[in-house]
Image: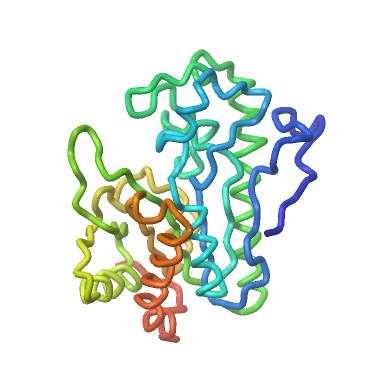
Amino acid sequence: MTVNKSFTGADYPLIGPEDPPPFSLLNENGQGSVLLVGDHVSNTIPRQLNNLGLEKASLNEHIAYDIGTHKLINHLSQHLDAPAVLAGYSRLVVDLNRSLEDDSVMPEVSDNTPIPGNQGMSTEHRRQRVHCFYTPYRVAVDGMLHRFKDRGVIPAFISIHSFTPEMAGFKRPWHVGILWDKDPRIPVPLMQQLRAHPAQFNIGDNEPYSGKHPADYTIDHHAEAAGLPHVSIEIRQDLVNSEEGAEEWATILDDALREILANPELYSIWQSL
């Protein structure tokens, strides 16, 4: 994994010398025509923000990060020989899958849990969070896309998330959710492949979340707007919260994606009607 340790000092006042950088690159020189992104893989809070006033136990819950996604992306990146851009900090610091105009980009409350460190923030402090954590991640994703462009490759863009087995008293039946909006090139055949698996998985078509919702900013901003083939994959957290589970699901996704990603016609700019 490649990390950049230059995000400290006066230019990045919220990142201390012992804090991680705002992003890391995994399998940076992978030769697959795919870019993986993990907006919510980390539950880290920079030391200066004092856990945002939360008990440490809260940072191990789904409000802080997408449980299991770091493990899953690590394995899937190897299967696909694909580079990945991974978030360095918790979505409670700044949610990288939201636009800056979205109130939930620095949530004051998450799943009924108040976030003290996000309440009453000054305009200057919000600006510092954007500068230190949000912008570097956006630039890193764009940088990886430019590398593909320099190679003459139109990449497939795959965003990985996870969801809780239960929410608001509702037990979610899906094993995997496939989120998409207008471009069907990856999501539709991917759902077909996963539904044909002998294990008879329950596959959510824009469930438990929808790719048509604006709270899907990374895909909308980096992939859909550019016409890149793309999909957002949501895995139920209990399925990937171990190395064994993450490897199993990386293999399942690799098998399901193999024929789709092998089609040369996939790698073109989508012209929405």
Apparent side of residue 32 relative to residue 151 in the rendered image (left or right): left
Screen quadrant of the C terminus: bottom left
Residue 12 or residue 168, whichever sits in front: 168
Residue 169 or residue 184, whichever sits in front: 169
Apparent side of residue 140 relative to residue 39 in the rendered image (left or right): right
Residue 77 in which image quadrant: bottom right
Apparent side of residue 81 relative to residue 177 in the rendered image (left or right): right
Q: Residue at x 53, y 38 (%)?
A: 43
* Percent position of residue 148, x then y: 61, 72
Residue 259 in which image quadrant: bottom left
Rendered position, 66 above or below 227: above
Q: Residue at x 65, y 59 (%)?
A: 143
* Percent position of residue 223, x then y: 46, 61
Rendered position, 90 above or below 259: above
Please say which color scheme the image uses: rainbow
Q: Residue at x 78, y 46 (%)?
A: 5
* Percent position of residue 58, x then y: 45, 28
Rendered position, 249 above or below 70: below
* Percent position of residue 121, x then y: 55, 17
Q: Is residue 101 visible?
A: no
